[in-house]
Amino acid sequence: MSTPPRSPARGRAARRATRVLALVAVLSVAVPVTHAAAADPDPSEPRTVHVTGTGVVRGTPDVLDLVLGIEIRAKGAADALRRNSELLRQVIDVLRDAGVTDDDIQTAALSIWPVTNDDGTAVIGYSVSNTVRVTLRDLDRAGAIIDEAATVAGDEIVVRGLSFSFDDNSRLVARARAEAVRQARAQAEQLAEAAEVTLGRLLSIDETSTPEGPIVRSADASGSTEAAAPIEPGSQNLSVRVQLRYEIT
């Protein structure tokens, strides 16, 4: 029995399929599969370990900074300012008589503003506030000095706020730094021992924090009773943090 002849269309389709398969095979052989190679570590760069230590010490502040002032209300702005100035001069005289130097007395703020009636339609007077920033270095007498200032100023005196600090904290900072470095060194030795490596030379040392600021307490006291409250500086933490970087082998 003879095979029936193929149609021309079927023959062309078969030839196209054969060419496609051949092309796929060629591409499969010609295109290589590549893999990204991991970069080898630079042998010139030393292996290192980074550690952080924090040193904390406590000390008793020896300086009191406070904002002390006078607030006066009067019908006229000039009268309010005059009376305010008179009382503030008396307060400053008290401070000077107590041994506070002019370098430790500084004007902090002076403000004058109108006072209106309840519905805000008319000005009924003026208020004047004048405050000074005072540094007291004898904490044993600080309460008595504030009490005497309140006595001469009466109900018009105000204490806006106070803070304790150190006149010279260099020794405390030195102790805190030494403790921070000692702590960081101990950590580096422990890590090297645990990792079974040898701790080498110190490559860098950085201080990443500063000692804490002064203790701040706010107040808004008027009259001698509140202003004469006992002054207790307590103790204050001082903290220093360092980072060390060691070579390891």
Image (cartoon, helix red, strand yellow):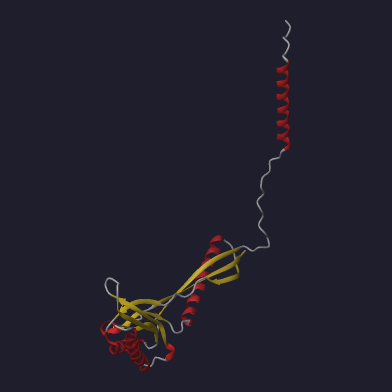
Residue farthest to the front, as pictured: 121
Q: Dividing the picture into quarters, in which one does residue 215 lie?
A: bottom left
**How far from the left and from the top, in percent, is residue 118?**
26, 72
Relative to 41, is 67 on the left or the right?
Answer: left
Relative to 158, is 201 on the left or the right?
Answer: right
What residue is drawn where x is 33% and y is 78%?
114
Q: Dividing the picture into quarters, in which one does residue 218 lie?
A: bottom left
What residue is drawn where x is 44% and y is 84%?
167
Q: Is residue 106 above or below residue 13?
A: below
**How far from the left and from the top, in percent, is residue 199?**
59, 67
Q: Is residue 226 above or below residue 187?
A: below
Q: Is residue 230 visible?
A: no
Viewer-proximal residue among 216 and 81: 81
**Count of number-bearing discs:** 0
What residue is drawn where x is 44% and y is 89%?
103
Residue farthest to the top, as pictured: 1
Q: Is residue 85 above or below residue 174?
A: below
Q: Quadrant of the N terminus?
A: top right
Q: Quadrant of the C terminus?
A: bottom right
**How far from the left and from the top, in percent, is residue 9?**
71, 17
What residue is drawn where x is 48% and y is 78%?
173
Relative to 62, is 208 on the left or the right?
Answer: right
Q: Dividing the picture into quarters, in which one does residue 146 lie?
A: bottom left
Viewer-proximal residue among 41 and 6: 6
Relative to 31, is 63 on the left or the right?
Answer: left
**How far from the left and from the top, in percent, is residue 16?**
72, 24
Q: Is residue 78 visible?
A: yes
Viewer-proximal residue among 107 and 44: 107
